Structures are given as C-alpha cells and as structure tokens.
Amino acid sequence: RRALAICRALARRRLSDACKKDFADVSTALKLLPPLIHALDGELGQILFRPHDPEFALLLEPLWALSWAVTLFAHNVDDRASLFVLWDRLLAAPPCFSLYVGAALVAHNRESLIATAMEDDAAPFLH
C-alpha cells in the first residue's frame, strides 16, 4: 500500500505532464533543451540545431528527449545504482533540473554527436 501511495504521489508531483492525454506540456518543456545546449556549448548547439536546414530543424522539436522526461532517464542509464542516485537527485531538485541533466548528457556525448552530425544524411541518426 505504501509503495502504491508513493508511486501515485510521484506521478502527481513529478510525472504529471507525462501522465496527461498527450505530451503537449512535456514537449513544451523539452523545447528548452536546444537553448540550454547552446548556452552550455555554443559550437555543439550550432552543429546540432540548424533551423535553416530542414533535416536538422527536426532536432529543434526534441522528441529525441521524450523518453528522458517520461522515464526519468531509465532508458539511458544502464547501471541501476547510478540510476537510483540520479533519481534521488532528480526527485530532490526542482522539476526543471532534469532539463539541465539532459543538456549535460548531450554535452557529455559531444564528440560522437559532432562526428555523426558531420556525416552525410546524419539527421535521422541524431533524431
């Protein structure tokens, strides 16, 4: 019973946007990721988010980060102990903190993202 109560509270307080009929609110929040990434690493932001390139403009609509918001990064962290530490941090911090974690993950993978972005027909692999 207690575990169910905790899960309900978590869904209401931290995952409420992801528990709605659509992901409009989640999508709105995720649109803050490209500017955050630009602020963190301007060069990476310029390479990944090209509003005038139709293929790369899709990255400005960050559906690529949807699983982060819905699962609190569970799909991207393989080590359970690390995932639990991350969840502790995410649950203790303001809800927007997960956006900063997402931006940091993108910056952490900078080299591989830039290498992929420089290849021909790269946009589908980045999305």
Image: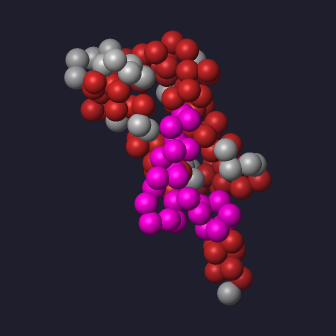
**94 sits left or right of 60 in the view:** right
Front-most of 6 and 20?
A: 20
List x then y, in percent, for residue 104. 60, 31
Q: Which residue appears at 61% of the width and 21% of the height?
A: 39
Q: Quadrant of the N terminus?
A: bottom right
List x then y, in percent, for residue 24. 47, 53
List x then y, in percent, for residue 18. 52, 60
Please, which residue is most extreme toward the right here? 92
Q: Is residue 2 above or below residue 13?
A: below
Please, which residue is most extreme toward the bottom here? 1
Q: Is residue 41 above or below residue 32?
A: above
Front-most of 80 and 15?
A: 15
Q: Which residue appears at 42% of the width and 16% of the height?
A: 47
What predominant SS class does the magenta segment belong to? helix
Is residue 59 in the magenta section? no
Q: Is residue 119 above or below residue 55?
A: above
Classify residue 88 by image quadrant.
bottom right
Query: The magenta stretch spans which residues?
Result: 10-33
Please, which residue is most extreme toward the left here? 121
Classify residue 102 by image quadrant.
top right
Is residue 28 in the magenta section? yes
Q: Is residue 42 above or below residue 17?
A: above
